[in-house]
Image (cartoon, rainbow, N blue to C red):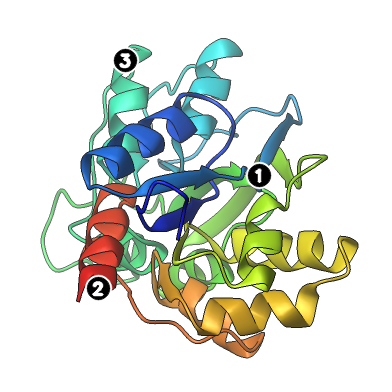
Amino acid sequence: MSERGRPRVAVFRPADERIETARTLLDGLGVEAVADPMLAVEPTGATPEAAAYVVFTSKTGAELVADAGWTPGDATVVAIGPKTADALQAAGYTVDLVPDEFSSTGLVELLAERVGEEPRSSGERPAADDTSVEVARSDHGSPVLLDGLRDAGADVHETVLYRLVRPEGSGESADLAAAGTLDATCFTSSLTVEHFLDAAAARGVRDEAIAGLNDAVVGVIGEPTRATAESLGIDVDVVPTEATFEALARETVAHLRR
């Protein structure tokens, strides 16, 4: 608990407007945000290849292709969720498809019939035999998306738009967890979990930090992140009903209040 009496909740968003938005949201929920960015973006300079469907899985990817002047041509543009869709639209792109579930699994469910060998109705594909899907994302994307699309019959190619690395100096939250003074965490990807533990190890408190997390409330954004956390010895308390940071923050704080 912080000196001001408000619970401390760690957030690991990149050090840009996303971490500030997280701070504002958590402040409004009556808790103290411990902003400890665990991801930094290193662009590769690559742009998506031509395909019938081009899939974007992050706001960062949308911004990078816009900065590079990429044009979709006749492709059907697919966004994993509303934040990615908003970023694409703000850059002037038309977003054709967004899944009901904002996750890799949701994208597979959305595209499976469209790229499958036997579509149920006409007009579901941009071209009669074009099942090509270009996935434009980071170097740490879930294999669920690529494997699921290939199993559905798609011709899948992946372009790595950027690499995600751990920022220098990260790990304040690991020290707090190790000291037993962190009340909750909001992990937004498997990589944030891994980088948190890397930072803890670098500070010599890995085991203590895991113990501290297991005495706190641990929220994760989806099932793949839950699987990663639990495989590393971290007990997960909250997986939000919707895979967005706002839902994660609200449901984690609600659990903490209980």
**Which mark, residue 255?**
2
Q: Residue at x 36, y 61 (%)?
A: 103
Find the distance from the CA under tag 3 to the CA under tag 1: 23 Å
Q: Is residue 93 above or below residue 157?
A: above
Mark 3 or 1, nearer chain start? 1
Percent position of residue 83, x then y: 31, 36
Q: Is residue 173 left or right of residue 72?
A: right
Q: CA distance from mark 3 to mark 2?
A: 35 Å
Residue 90's tag is 3
Cβ atoms under marks 1 and 2 closer than 8 Å: no
| Relative side of 101 to 19, left or right | left
Q: Residues within 10 Å of mark 3 (few under 14, many from 20)?
A: few
- Kind of residue sitting beneath label 2: His
Task: Give the number of the disc on residue 39.
Answer: 1
68 left or right, relative to 155: right
Q: Nearer the viewer, residue 158 or 120?
A: 158
**Which residue is found at the position 74% from the left and 46% from the top?**
170
Q: Dividing the picture into quarters, in which one does residue 96 lie?
A: top left
Q: Are marks 3 and 2 in contact (CB under 8 Å)?
A: no
Where 160 falls versus 67 (above or below)?
below
Tell us which disc is closer to us: 1 or 2. 2
